[in-house]
Image (cartoon, helix red, strand yellow):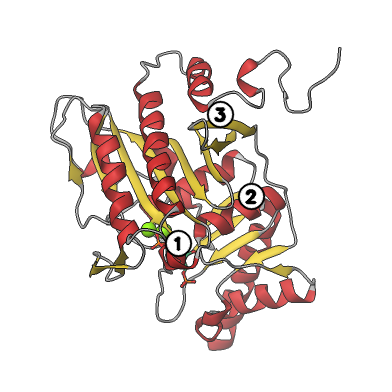
Amino acid sequence: MKTDPYQPNQGNLAYSVGVTLDRFIKLKQSDFPFASGELSQILRDIALASKIVNRETNRAGLSNIGGAFGQTNVQGEEQQKLDVIANIRFMRALSKGGEVCAIVSEEEDCVIDLQNNSGKYVVAIDPLDGSSNIDVNISIGTIFSIYRRKTPVGSPITTEDVMQPGNQQVAAGYVLYGSSTMLVYTTGFGVNGFTYEASLGEFFLSHPSIKAPETGKIYSINEGLELEWEAGVKSFVKDCKEKKYQSRYIGSLVADFHRNLLKGGIYLYPATFNNPSGKLRLLYEANALAFIIEQAGGKASDGENRILDIQPESLHQRTPLLIGSKHMVEEAEELFRISESEINTLSR
Ligand SMILES: O=P(O)(O)OC[C@H]1O[C@](O)(COP(=O)(O)O)[C@@H](O)[C@@H]1O
Ligand SMILES: [Mg+2]
Ligand SMILES: [Mg+2]
C-alpha cells in the first residue's frame, strides 16, 4: 500500500492534507468525549473573522484603512486603523455565537463582559499583531487564547474566570496574514496549520502535526535595544554570532514565531533596563504561543519560569519572552543563570 507522507496516522481522515478546517474541527471533536460543540464553534467564529481581516489587510493600501486611528490604547500605543477594525471584527464574531462570556483584548482597557452568563468560555485576543508593519506590507497576525470559565455557568463572570494561568488554556492559536494566510492552532492534542484559499473562502489543512525542531540556527531579537540588555542576553546573542547563527527579526511576533516554529530557532523579547517586564503581553501574546510551542515540542519561558505557569495579576501585564526550539531556549536560560550568578558573586 502506497504510504502518504502527509497522513501520519494511516486511516485518520482528519490528517489528510486538503481537509477543510471545518471538517477537521468536527473530526477532532472526538478528542473530547464530553464535547458539546461550543469550542468548535468559537474556532469557526475566529476563522470567519480572520477571513474578513485578511480581506481588509490585503487591500489596506487601496482603501483608507491604512495608517493611524488617532487614538492610543491602554498601553499608550498609537492604535492603527486596522487594529481597531480587527478588534471590532473579532468582538462581533465572538459575541454572536453565545459560547463566550468574556473577552480580553489588547485594544480594550477592561474585560469585555458580554453579559452572557450562559457562555462557558473566556477569550483573550491580540486582534492585530505586528501593528508597526501594517502600512509597509510586512506579515502581521492575530493571536488568541481560549479558557473555560471557572465560575459556574449562569453566574456573573469574576476575575477568577479571566486571570487564569496559561496552563488552563483549552485552545490557542494564531492567524498569519503573510504571503499566504495561515491559521495555526492547538487544543492540547498537537499543532496543525491551515492555509487559506481565498477563491474558495476555505482554510485547508496544509501543515499537519507540526513539530518544532529541537534546535536551530536562527535567533530573533531587536538588536536596537542591545544597550539596554542584561549581561545574560548579551552573552547569549554573542554566542549565537560566534556559532554563525542567522539573525532574523521581522518585528511581528506571529511572523517571527511561525518561521522559527517551522525551521528551528529562538525568539527573544527579554527584559531591558527601561522595560524590566519586557514588551509582550502575557494574556494575549505569550500564553497562546507558549501553548503552541510546547505542543510542538519546543519551550517558552521568561528566562526562568515556564510562561504557562505564570499567574496573571493584571489584564495587560507584560512578560519577558524566550520561545522556540527546546535546546536553544534551555541554552539561553543557562546563560542568563550564569551571568546572574557571576554578577551576584562580583557584587559581594
Ligand atoms: O518594535 P519592537 O520593540 O521590536 O517590538 C516588536 C514587537 O512588538 C509587537 O508589534 C507587539 O505587538 P502589537 O503589534 O500587537 O502591539 C510584536 O508583534 C513584535 O514582535
Ligand atoms: Mg501583538
Ligand atoms: Mg496588537
Q: Is residue 6 left or right of residue 284?
A: right
Q: Amino acid at mark 2?
A: Leu
Which sits in the foreground, 132 or 65? 65
Q: Position of residue 94 (x, y in %)?
A: 28, 36
As drawn, the label of residue 261 is: 2
Amino acid at pointer 3: Phe
Report the amino acid beneath label 1.
Answer: Gly
Q: Secondary structure at mark 3?
A: loop
Q: Position of residue 34 (x, y in %)?
A: 40, 14
Q: What SS does tag 1 mark?
A: loop
Q: Quadrant of the N terminus?
A: top right
Distance CA(mark 2)–CA(mark 1) = 17 Å
Outermost residue toward the right in this view: 1
Image mark for residue 130? 1
* Residue under pointer 3: 189
Q: What residue is rendered at 42% in x and 40% in y?
A: 51
Q: Quadrant of ligand 2?
A: bottom left
Q: Secondary structure at mark 2?
A: helix
Q: Is residue 169 visible?
A: no
- Give the left or right position of residue 286, taking residue 214 as reference: left
